[in-house]
Image (tube, helix red, strand yellow):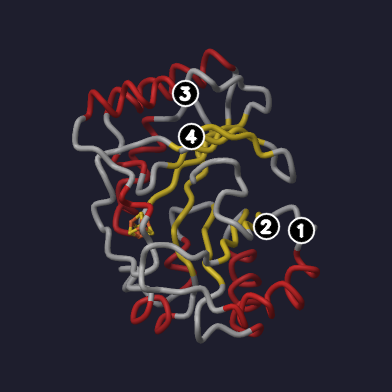
Amino acid sequence: MERYGIITSKQKREIVLLRGRGCAYAKCTFCDYHLDKCPDEDANFNLNREVLNRVTGEYGNLEVINSGSVFELDGKTLDYIKEICKSKGINILHFESHYMYRNRIPALRREFSDFTLKMKLGLETFDFDLRENVMCKGISERNPVEISRNFDEANFLFGIFGQTVQSMERDIITGLNLFERICVNIMCENSTSVAPDEKVIAEFKSKLYPKYADNENIDILINNTDFGVGE
Ligand code: SF4
């Protein structure tokens, strides 16, 4: 499993895939990366410290992901993230979080007030029925403005049965209106029962990818390892 990568296009940054105690939600039907977890906080810290020691600070911008939410990382890892960022001159720091932790974000921003924090929401789509009845994402809020409150960035998941060019483009446009940046992930085969819909993916690639590929505010991951981390 590669846990360190460098993103050299659009918003250049380093990225680390750390390990936490595990996603406390763990019910999204399409997801198996929440399996990357360990209940032993010391073992997690030792692993995370090694990964963080590879950070150079070359872009002053670091994205931290952990197959779950930042709130599931141990305290020593969080302190070490601060230490590394300070020593390497990193001032922009991205974390991911499930919607259920939204009320803890203001306190996290205060805790990391030496940095500009960019909180990324795992949203997947604004389409309530698809998100909650198919993906089982656990976001009961329907209002897009309300959903985006507390978050700066969002992940979307395309390539699922039922999505159309129109619905995916609606997500992109609304996402760009409500967030500073969005990340589009194309569904890949994994160990869950949710399969990529090749027809939807082909439609995305032919009609939407050419239109948005150069948009500086959208990262598009055709393969889930395109950021250089994962397996
Ligand atoms: S997508 Fe995120 S919130 Fe959902 S189960 Fe996976 S790690 Fe947890």
Per the model, the C-alpha gap separating discs 1 and 3 is 29 Å
Q: What amino acid type should be assigned to the residue bearing mark 4?
A: Arg
Tell me if residue 197 comes above or below residue 182 in the rendering. Answer: below
Asked whether the beta carbons under mark 1 and mark 4 sit within 8 Å of each other, the answer is: no
Rendered image: mark on residue 52: 3
Calculate the distance from the C-alpha at mark 3 to the C-alpha at mark 2: 25 Å
- Residue flagged by tag 1: what amino acid is it? Asn
Q: Is mark 3 within 8 Å of ligand 1?
A: no
Q: Which x, y percent locates residue 219?
A: 66, 54
Q: Is residue 111 above or below residue 218?
A: above
Which of pointers 2 and 4 indicates the residue nearer the eye?
Answer: 4
- Residue 179 picture quarter: bottom right
Q: What residue is drawn where x is 31% and y is 50%?
A: 35
Question: Which numbered disc flags the more N-terminal residue, 3 or 2?
Answer: 3
Extreme residue in the top direction? 87
Q: Residues within 10 Å of mark 4 (few under 14, many from 20)?
A: many
The residue that disc 1 covers is: 215
Residue 208: percent from left, percent from top = 73, 73
Q: Nearer the viewer, mark 1 or mark 4?
A: 4
**Chain-order first, disc 4 or disc 3:** 4
Residue at screen point 62% across, 49% down: 226
Please tell me whether mark 4 or mark 3 is closer to you in this view.
Answer: 4
As helix, strand or loop, the secondary structure at mark 3 comes to: helix
Q: Nearer the viewer, residue 13 or 103?
A: 13
